[in-house]
Image (cartoon, grey):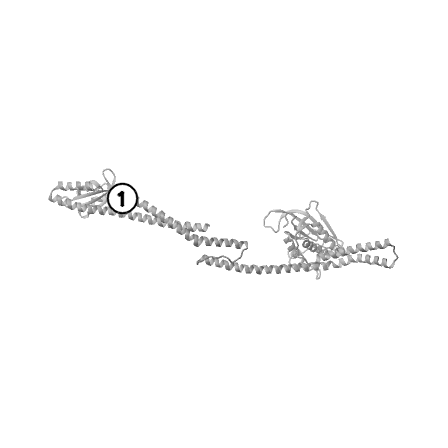
Amino acid sequence: MQLFSRIYTFLLGGMVVVLVAFGNIKYEMEIRQFDQNMVEHAESTGRIIAQMVSRLWLEEGVEQARELLADCNRADQGVTVSWIWLDELESIFASEQPAITTLTAGTLPASFIAADDQHRQRRFTLIPTVVSGERQGILLLSQSLQPLADYSRKILVSTLLATILLALASAASIYLFIYLNIRKPLEQLSRKAIEIGRGNLAADLDLKGEGELVSLAQTMNNMCTRLLIAKEKIHFEYLARLKTLEQLRHTEKLSTIGQISAGIAHEMGTPLNVVDGRAKMIISEPLDRAEVIRCAEIICSQAMKMTQIIRQLLDFSRKKKPGPKTRENLAELVHQVFHLLRPLAARQQVELQLRTAPDARLHSRVDAQQILQVLMNVIMNGIQATPAGSHVLVELTSTMLKSMIHTDDQLREYIRIEVFDEGTGIPEHLLTEIFTPFYTTKQIGLGTGLGLSIARELLEEHGGWIEVKNRSVRGAHFSIFLPPEETAP
């Protein structure tokens, strides 16, 4: 997890910085303390030797005092003791230590670092010594800085090792703490968020302990519970909406059947008259067997014709649940609609025409009953709007265009069913209103205002849509778009 890595890196980096700073401070303190110990050692040793030299100088002479200094140099390899006069200091060290010129007997002892005759850095300590005469004697103690360098190296190595060990221990502790208290809870929260996105709303997130992440887990569980309740509520509302939509669609079907019933009744009258006439011939006239059989065949033919008309009406008007989408020829569906609407068109003295482009793709996977309802509504609107003596044209073509239901700009193939009427057209300000539920421009009793809105819903369920515009000559132009069989949903 990136958050875990960032937190761990940040804390570990801060801890390393603190440890390095602490180790550096400790290193500097140790070096200063070691150097101070060297100075104190030199001063204490120098005072002892100075007292001994002063006593021998006064009691036994200069040679005995110098012999004592030689013995001291042979005994202690770390400190070299020599005798000089105070007034000789300037000539020996003034070039490297200008402050030497300000030294007096009252400012001693003093200690400083300077180069010896071999240009090696050493620590020099000056101890005043009381001897006879007017000149001020000084013991010059010279110490090698090699022990300081060795000690510095040792302290540096030990400090680095301690820092590394502390850093590793801190890293392990921080990692374990963050892993148990941050990373694992965050991973659980992340997995639960992914599950919620996939639809798993079970409130099963269980984090132990206390803290903000535990509170967040409880909040997510509460959210899941509320989402489950909301989901169930939406599901019930969706089922109620579907039921209402199906009822509205069925109502529109019944309204359409009512409008074409007069024409159907007229079409039923002709075969009924034929049946009635043939039956009376059999009853009232002496007919031979061949003529009776002929009359019976005619009666059966007309009965089958009436049965077919009634079955089509029943199939169209029967309330059905949405069926599975099957491969349908859209031109055949248009012919079925023509067959049902032809009596109504005859009464209106309107001719129905179908034109199919030679290269048009006519097959699509659809619910035939729903597409029949769409075509019935649109074509019947055209019949009602068209004056007597004119015609309604239905044209089927294939076209490539950008989809109205997809957000990309990709060109796709669609089957276009165009319905042209020769009416007065639709006022421009109403073109965007005619798909609104219960909106109609027809007279009372000629429409419910649901036909076009239901048609649009049914087409959207099939991955298509409907458009309308006025023709350049006269009348309205409806375009229905459906995906061909390969790309239909």
* Relative horizontal placement of residue 41, taking residue 290 as reference (left or right): left
Residue 421 on image: x %, y % = 71, 53
Viewer-side residue, 264 vs 52: 52
* Image height of 143 relative to 225, above or below: above
Most extreme residue toward the left, as rendered?
59
* Relative horizontal placement of residue 388, taking residue 197 as reference (left or right): right
Q: Residue 104, can we see it?
A: no
Residue pictured at 78% horizontal, 57% vertical: 268
Local packing at callout 1 (Cα closer than 10 Å; few below 14, some 14-19, many 20+) is some
Kindly identify the amino acid type of the residue bearing the numbered disc 1: Leu
Most extreme residue toward the bottom, as rendered?
444
Q: Residue 172, can we see it?
A: yes
Viewer-side residue, 74 vs 149: 74
Residue pictured at 29% horizontal, 48% vertical: 30
Q: Secondary structure at mark 1?
A: helix
Q: Name the residue beneath numbered marker 1.
A: 148
Residue 266 on image: x %, y % = 78, 58
Most extreme residue toward the top, as rendered?
118
Viewer-side residue, 161 vs 50: 161
Residue 365 on image: x %, y % = 66, 50
Residue 435 on image: x %, y % = 65, 56
Tally of numbered tags: 1
